[in-house]
Image (cartoon, grey):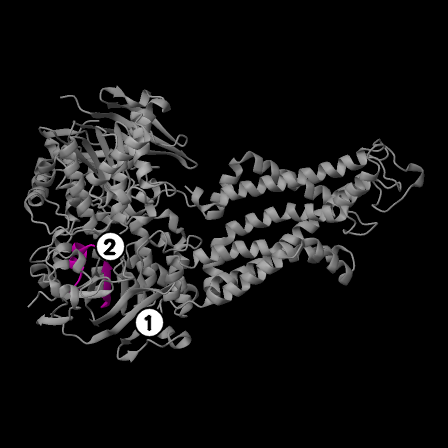
């Protein structure tokens, strides 16, 4: 099966007054049709920049793609003109953002916003597009779609707005939905509803999802594969059960440990000390080494190469090196 | 590089090393200056203003004539070696008078802008900070004053105080402070709900401390922009008043007075209006370019 | 577990906002809580439930509409100006947004130092020393004192905010969603720091958040708020093990589980819709329109907030 999205060795940099900030430093991952992939990492790790590059939304200048390929359905999006990209955005790839208020137009009714994409990409007449917009509102679980169609975004609550944005993004039935922190600004109860909705829509429409988040908690119930990013690089990637149950990278371990577990007794919450590096001058070697409790001399000197530890499970960590085997047992134990 | 077992020895990783800030530190003002420098038009404006300031201070002494010195044999001389920019209908050196006029005009602009700053920030700051009823009353007063035609003020003040530079300052200051007051009030109203202001209140900070340490410094960007844009407006208004004969009195001259007198001989001696009119235009453009540049440089939303 | 003396008693606290046109937003509508010395009391609820308003009223940023705040036996409700100032030192707050809670024009040293200036706690070299001490206390370096807030990451800024609150050596800190704007990994860092500081300095916290899992981790007792009222209060382990109010149950089931197998098999209490404002609360129980088990009585009568078993309070008709 050919992947719907294939990112190959993507490198993106931003030119600032203080020098070049290497936001994405050689990222590769694939998304298969109908599959949900999570891209996880702390803010500033390059997960959003990667997604925006896919959508051709990186402001340039200061941003620029240094190297790499983004194959969508076999075609390299980096070679597309702005006009061609417009035909892809909202049509073949949909995107939703953290803050629906900034991505919905406050002066346009929700119905027209959903219909707009349909009219543009599928050349539907206005009445048909509105009819379909109503279907979309129904599909994302907004009650009274007839009435809601003619309302403005400010008349919607936070959760409803996020649903409306999903409806806008999915109106043209894209093959891929990129969701950039879609639930971060929402209450836990609403977050749960939205994740649930995305899971149902994925099954119903057979689309692929890239879920970008900092919270490994929301990933478990939705995604089948996980990519863990740190400082513009992939630290670990693999099937969801591999990542959660056979965690290899100390960073992934740290992310998992910082999600509190509600239980009969209180287990101590382990946090990752320190702060991610400033990519204006990334540390030599493994970028996580300064915060890693298992760091070795080599970690501060050389960048670890990616190793496949089991089918589809890739790790970039010196602990997987044969010379570090004795250390690894120590870590796992 | 060869990998040796020795390289796989554990090292002490300290959280401390991950807390170090590697980027060079910049203050808000350094950052704004850096952005302003990138704006060519604004820098051109700034340089022009600099040159004009130097010329306004030294220009009147360069040609060897004073601004009121007459030579009736040289009436309406065209530009030449003796009078660089020619002489006027009373035989006075136009070069000297031009820079003298520029000095008065810039003085009017800067003083008006300073009056605006003091009164506007004070009034707007109190209005926005107090909020509620006080704010409502103070803003209604501004609106009423705003509705009074500007010329009426000036003529009334001229009658009461007599014409002169002081009257011009007061008249212009009395008009332009209101714009500043409104801007400052709006800024303060939105800033006072910020969490850092709440934090200061929880710490027990008094109103003055909050106003001067937290609110005004954060409103400085819009205040400076408004000040910069008030200067050319004041210069232009003064020129306009002078043109109507309501400006500074002879033998003093502002750019407006010069243009107004030059106007009388526009057919025969066009240079008499050309030079002051050009200088007014350049001044306006320079300040407006700088003001726009500052708006881009100081706008927190542009911050990256 | 905690039998200590009561540090702050909140009695019948109400905070209404007049929206004009005769509409009144009852953001906080009669809450009663006792915060004991040295404990952490969690306060959870969805956005718009009035938990932040409650926090702000407690630190006297808002004037309460009704009710009283009794701090160490003294009523501080009516105090203002110089009579309130000594209590300002004892009662501090940490804010939600680490980007908005630090003055961008002041260095971190001055931000922390301002607290010392206001209460005249230290001057000159002593002030500098105290700033360095506070920075160290929250895990930052002394060199950070000369930096401006925008040079820090979210987690670092939040620690500066904690240092500012600690500068006046408070007894009670109201933490108003201090972690909800941070990455999960950094949330854990901040929560662990707060716990450590509590042990070291004997602090008392009122910890406000919408995330039940973090609240449960840090709190000794948890109060659940819905539309301006406390609907359930219990020891945190008890609340997790035996939630009684249907709203608490729903909140609990919405907590994301970082475990694919468990996530797949867990049962969820689906909650319809979201909180509609507290402007015109429905008659009877306020949660009734969203409640999956609502009965006729819930629509007619407001439930009484009562102790159903030892140290476990709930306001629901259906709990016996």
Find numbered disc 2 in the image and state the secondary structure of the residue it sits on. helix
Sequence-first tag of 2 and 1: 1
Q: Which mark is residue B1?
A: none
In the rendered structure, which segment of residues is drawn in magenta? C200-222
Residue at the right extreme of this rendering: B73
User: Where residue C216 appears, x then y in whole percent?
Assistant: 15, 59
Mark 1 belongs to chain: C
- The residue shown at (45%, 48%) is B27
* Residue A105 position within the rendered picture, expressed as x and y whole percent measured from the top left: 36, 40
Q: Position of residue C70 (x, y in %)?
A: 27, 76
In the rendered view, tell whether residue C83 sits above or below residue C158. Answer: below
Quarter of the image with the N terminus of chain B is top left
**Horizontally, is B134 left or right of B272 in the view?**
left
Q: In this rendering, would A75 be left or right of C143?
A: left
Quick one: quadrant of the C terminus of chain B? top left
Tag count: 2
In the rendered image, is residue B162 in sight? yes
Q: Disc 1 designates what residue?
A: C65
Q: Nearer the viewer, mark 2 or mark 1?
A: 1
Q: Residue at x 18, y 31 (%)?
A: A208
Q: Residue at x 28, y 55 (%)?
A: C139
| Mark 1 Cα shell of 10 Å, populated few (<14), some (14-19), many (≥20) | some
Q: Is residue A308 above or below residue C170?
A: above
Q: Which residue is mark 2?
A: C190
Disc 2 from disc 1: Cα separation? 33 Å
- Give the camera-side residue of B162 and B132: B132
Near mark 2 (Cα within 10 A), the count class, few <14, some 14-19 or many ≥20, is many
Q: Kindly identify which chain the residue marked by label 2 belongs to.
A: C
Q: Is residue C206 magenta?
A: yes
Left or right of A213 on screen, residue B24: right
Q: Nearer the viewer, residue C283 or A183?
A: C283
């Amino acid at each position: 099966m050919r992947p719907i999205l294939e990112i190959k060795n993507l490198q993106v940099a931003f030119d600032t007054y203080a020098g070049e900030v290497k936001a994405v430093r050689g990222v590769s991952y694939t998304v298969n049709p109908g599959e949900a992939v999570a891209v996880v990492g702390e803010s500033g790790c390059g997960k959003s920049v990667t997604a925006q590059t896919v959508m051709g939304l990186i402001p340039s200048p200061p941003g620029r793609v240094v190297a790499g390929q983004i194959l969508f359905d076999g075609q390299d999006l980096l070679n597309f003109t702005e006009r061609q990209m417009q035909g892809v955005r909202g049509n073949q790839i949909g995107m939703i953002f953290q803050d629906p208020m900034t991505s919905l137009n406050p002066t346009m009714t929700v119905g027209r916003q959903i219909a707009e994409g349909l009219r543009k990409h599928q050349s539907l007449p206005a009445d048909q597009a509105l009819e379909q917009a109503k279907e979309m509102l129904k599909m994302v679980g907004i009650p009274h779609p007839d009435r809601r169609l003619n309302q403005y975004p400010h008349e919607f609550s936070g959760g409803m707005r996020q649903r409306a944005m999903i409806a806008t993004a999915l109106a043209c039935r894209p093959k891929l939905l990129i969701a950039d922190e879609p639930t971060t600004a929402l209450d836990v109860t609403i977050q749960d509803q939205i994740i649930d909705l995305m899971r149902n829509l994925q099954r119903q429409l057979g689309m692929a999802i890239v879920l970008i988040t900092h919270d490994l908690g929301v990933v478990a119930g939705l995604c089948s594969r996980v990519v863990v990013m740190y400082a513009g690089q992939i630290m670990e990637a693999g099937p969801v059960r591999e990542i959660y149950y056979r965690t290899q990278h100390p960073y992934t371990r740290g992310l998992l440990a910082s999600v509190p577990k509600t239980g009969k007794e209180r287990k101590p919450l382990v946090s990752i000390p320190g702060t991610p590096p400033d990519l204006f001058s990334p540390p030599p070697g493994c970028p996580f080494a300064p915060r890693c409790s298992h760091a070795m001399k080599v970690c501060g000197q050389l960048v670890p190469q990616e190793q496949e530890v089991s089918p589809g499970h890739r790790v970039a960590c010196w602990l997987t090196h044969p010379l570090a085997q004795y250390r690894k047992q120590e870590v796992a134990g | 590089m060869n990998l040796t077992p020795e390289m796989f020895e554990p090292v002490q990783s300290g959280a401390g090393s991950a807390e170090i800030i590697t980027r060079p530190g910049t203050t808000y003002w350094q950052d704004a200056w850096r952005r302003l420098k990138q704006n060519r038009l604004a820098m051109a404006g700034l340089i022009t203003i600099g040159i004009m300031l130097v010329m306004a201070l030294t220009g009147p002494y360069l040609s060897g004539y004073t601004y009121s010195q007459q030579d009736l044999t040289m009436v309406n001389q065209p530009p030449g070696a003796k009078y660089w920019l020619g002489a006027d209908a009373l035989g006075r050196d136009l070069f000297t008078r031009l820079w003298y006029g520029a000095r008065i005009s810039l003085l009017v602009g800067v003083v008006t802008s300073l009056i605006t700053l003091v009164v506007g920030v004070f009034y707007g700051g109190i209005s926005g900070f107090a909020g509620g009823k006080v704010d409502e009353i103070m803003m209604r007063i501004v609106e009423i004053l705003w509705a009074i035609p500007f010329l009426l003020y000036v003529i009334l003040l001229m009658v009461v105080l007599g014409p002169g530079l002081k009257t011009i300052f007061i008249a212009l200051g009395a008009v332009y402070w209101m714009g500043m007051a409104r801007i400052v009030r709006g800024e303060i109203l939105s800033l006072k709900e910020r969490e850092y202001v709440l934090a200061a209140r929880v710490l027990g900070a008094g109103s003055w401390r909050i106003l001067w340490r937290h609110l005004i410094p954060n409103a400085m960007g819009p205040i400076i922009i408004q000040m910069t844009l008030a200067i050319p407006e004041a210069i232009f208004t003064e020129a306009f008043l002078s043109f109507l004969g309501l400006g500074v009195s002879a033998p003093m001259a502002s750019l407006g007075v010069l243009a107004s007198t030059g106007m009388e001989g526009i057919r025969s001696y066009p240079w008499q209006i050309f030079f002051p009119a050009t200088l007014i235009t350049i001044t306006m453009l320079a300040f407006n370019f700088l003001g726009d540049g500052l708006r881009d440089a100081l706008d927190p939303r542009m911050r990256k | 577990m905690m039998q200590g003396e009561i540090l702050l008693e909140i009695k019948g606290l109400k905070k209404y906002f007049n929206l004009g046109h005769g509409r009144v937003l009852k953001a906080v509508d009669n809450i009663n809580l006792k915060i004991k010395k040295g404990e952490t009391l969690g306060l959870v609820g969805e956005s718009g439930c009035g938990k932040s308003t409650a926090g702000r009223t407690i630190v006297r940023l808002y004037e309460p509409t009704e009710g009283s705040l009794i701090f160490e036996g003294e009523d501080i409700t009516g105090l203002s100006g110089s009579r309130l100032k000594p209590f300002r030192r004892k009662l501090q707050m940490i804010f939600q947004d680490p980007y908005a809670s630090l003055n961008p024009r002041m260095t971190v040293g001055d931000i922390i130092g301002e607290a010392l200036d206001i209460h005249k706690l230290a001057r000159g070299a002593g002030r500098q020393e105290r700033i360095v001490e506070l920075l160290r206390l929250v895990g930052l370096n002394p060199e950070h004192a000369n930096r401006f807030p925008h040079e820090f990451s979210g987690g670092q800024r939040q620690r500066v905010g904690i240092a500012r609150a600690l500068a006046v050596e408070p007894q009670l800190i109201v933490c108003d969603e201090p972690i909800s704007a941070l990455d999960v990994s950094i949330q854990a860092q901040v929560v662990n720091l707060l716990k450590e500081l509590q042990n070291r300095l004997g602090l008392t916290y009122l910890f406000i958040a919408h995330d039940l899992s973090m609240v449960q981790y840090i709190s000794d007792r948890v109060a659940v708020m819905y539309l301006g009222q406390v609907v359930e209060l219990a020891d945190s382990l008890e609340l997790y093990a035996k939630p009684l109010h249907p709203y608490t149950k729903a909140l609990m089931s919405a907590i994301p589980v970082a475990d694919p197998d468990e996530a797949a098999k867990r049962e969820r209490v689906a909650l319809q819709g979201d909180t509609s404002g507290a402007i015109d609360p429905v008659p009877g129980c306020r949660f009734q329109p969203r409640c999956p088990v609502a009965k006729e009585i819930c629509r007619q009568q407001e439930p009484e907030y009562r102790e159903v078993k030892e140290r476990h309070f709930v306001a629901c008709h259906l709990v016996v």
